[in-house]
Image (cartoon, rainbow, N blue to C red):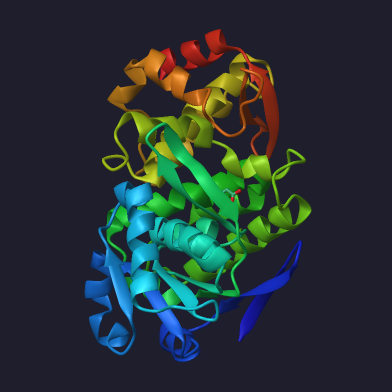
Amino acid sequence: MKTIQIDHKNGKYSVQFQELDQALADLPSDLRIVTDENVAQLYEAKLGNFQVLSISPGEQSKSMDGLGKILSWLAQSRATRKTTLCAFGGGVVGDLAGFAAAVYMRGIPLIQIPTSLLSQVDSSVGGKVGIDLPEGKNLAGAFYPPVHVSICSDSLATLPARQFINGMAEVWKYGFIMDTGLLDILSQEKLSSAHPVLSSIVERCIRLKAEVVQADEFETLGLRAILNFGHTVGHTIEFATGYGPVLHGEAISIGMVVESRIGERIGLSPNGTADQVIHCLLSQGLPVTHECLRDVDKLVQAMYADKKSEKGEIAMSLLSDIGSCRLMKGVEESVIRSALQAS
Ligand code: GLY
């Protein structure tokens, strides 16, 4: 079995590339699984012998209420400190169940089996878990490394087209921030969930993410923040639209366009960068604008709540060129407003 080892402050964990049946067979016996109703239906036969809690699909479950439901279920089903919690599903399930594992009895073992493209290439790796608050996205959470992550490429075969394209936003992001070779491949190949190149692309993205999170696990050095390209604006789009109608990847796709325009406006990235980003995202069928961008005041206010912002100043990770990115502090509100208006 191919694995990637990821070091963290208290040890290491492996990302294992394996078949889904094998990943399920390898799970420990003292186990609870959290998934969502769509995934539960899809894998009904495979999950039949496990103790499973299915949450409502969608970002709205990543809430205090959703967290409370999982914690109560763990307590009612007599989970102990030795019980392993497996997050089986997309990014919402991984973040929410991961946070439940981090706080239940002050922490129980966590296994991530991400079943969506987005959760395989991004959210299941790196140890970030958390929930949204009414005040903003991902505002409560923890760094909580899993025991291991199982990447099962066979689970991608059942992904609906919208979910696949949603995940591709994060794949393009890796190209924009640090891997022009990846952009070359993505520009040549029209990827789909059945494409033979897909599993090597997933592995490439995980290796890129592993490199970044090992260099700056707790996002204190400004390195890990580059993974947030498109996310400052993207998170406010999710917030402004009520967490649901615009999927995370769709929101960060639009966010990458706006943030590319900001990069150009402050003279960090060459003119034409935003046009290149737009061209790539449109070729993937990703959105590059949304009507909520008209509500500039609401979006800008929400940006001050972003975790990267400090001392009343907005910070964002912006492209210095296609293929490189850096965290910029104190981005002028007037520049952000003009980029939103142009989008
Ligand atoms: N998804 C961004 C990070 O893990 O830092």
Measured as percent of width and height from the top left, residue 21 is found at 41, 88
Observer able to see residue 5: no
Residue found at the very far left of the displayed protein: 41
Q: How many marks?
A: 0
Measured as percent of width and height from the top left, residue 190 is found at 42, 56
Front-lying residue, 204 or 12: 12
Q: Residue at x 69, y 54 (%)?
A: 213
Q: Quadrant of the C terminus?
A: top left
- Residue 164, compared with residue 338, is above or below; it is below
Measured as percent of width and height from the top left, residue 79 is found at 43, 78
Observer able to see residue 235: yes
- Residue 132, compared with residue 110, is above or below; it is above
Front-lying residue, 299 or 196: 299
Q: Residue at x 65, y 15 (%)?
A: 266
Q: Quadrant of the N terminus?
A: bottom right
Q: Is residue 80 toward the left or the right of residue 292 in the image?
A: right
